[in-house]
Image (cartoon, helix red, strand yellow):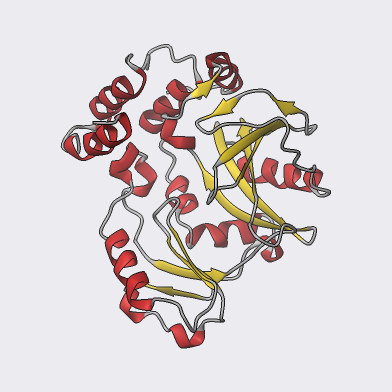
Amino acid sequence: MKQKEFLKKLKYMLNFLPDQAYIQLYFFAKFHKFCDLKNPETFNEKIQWLKLYDRQPLYVQLVDKVEVKKYVAKMLGDEYVIPTLGVWDDPYDIDFDSLPDQFVLKCNHDSGNVIICMDKNIFDRKSAQKKLAKLLQQNFYYVGREWPYKNVRRKILAEPYLVDESGTELKDYKIFNFNGEPKVIQVDYGRFIQHKRNLYDTDWKYINAAIQYPTDASHEIAKPDNLGKMLELARILSRDIPHVRTDFYSIDKKIYFGEMTFYHGSGFEKFTPESFNLYMGDLLELPKR
């Protein structure tokens, strides 16, 4: 059995365990060593520590893809929020007739599962409803023990289908903030062809390191004209938070908020070289327990 398949099954096999035991066993299965929670040093270790010991109630609102929009509108302004076309508790209540020809559907408690409609006339509504119904049954908390997701009231939301200057995809600029200060920017591309991920510092200098997916120094990604504004917005959203990743889109030079992620890759992604895992860990100053 391949490791990826084994790890997927392991998540469900360990559901009965309390958080710390689950984290330690899964961490060992992934990296062949236990997580040092007493003296965490790497980024991945500190992410596990934050899951267990940094439990601010506000995080529950901020991981909810519906509720976080209210927070962002208050902190940054409505102009940075992607419009919501509809919110439903049940996928079979979705009013497709009210939606435009192109749109996206997603769950507010989930990560990475987006249903894209490019043409409503040929869109498979029943298939989409079936997938959404299945997603609503899943509690994302059990995937990596990211506690804020545990009690999110699960919903479905629709948003406009957006693309950037490429005309084919929507790059998101994932800004890693440490104690309120942006330090590293991640840009994913080629997700539906060959997923790669480049890293940059805040001066847009390429970082020769990889997190989970391959990096490509020869693939030139232009520095966004509004990068300075993105960093300013990231500082506002990450204020008084030990670590959070704030994601933004840039469309026709206009910035839109994407999401806030407190536990990048749930703290289980591979760093190459491992020294970059330590570097990111050094940036993350943990609060007092």
From this view, report whether residue 117 is shown above or below residue 178.
below
Give how far across and how far down residue 260 sits, in percent.
Answer: 54, 47
Q: Nearer the viewer, residue 2 or 68?
A: 2
State the residue at coordinates (40%, 67%): 156
| Residue 190 shows in the view | yes
Image quadrant where one finds the C terminus: top left
State the residue at coordinates (45%, 55%): 64
Give how far across and how far down residue 23 sits, in percent.
Answer: 30, 27
Q: Nearer the viewer, residue 46 or 74?
A: 46
From this view, report whether residue 176 is shown above or below residue 129.
above
| Residue 183 shows in the view | no
Give how far across and how far down residue 56 sits, in percent.
Answer: 44, 40
Q: Is residue 209 left or right of residue 119?
A: right
Q: Nearer the viewer, residue 257 or 251?
A: 251
Give how far across and how far down residue 143 sits, in percent.
Answer: 31, 41
State the residue at coordinates (36%, 19%): 31
Q: Is residue 222 left or right of residue 200?
A: right
Q: Residue furthest right?
A: 225
State the residue at coordinates (28%, 33%): 7
Q: How many marks?
A: 0
Residue 201 image-quadrant placement: top right
Image quadrant where one finds the N terminus: top left
From this view, report whether residue 112 is shown above or below residue 143.
below
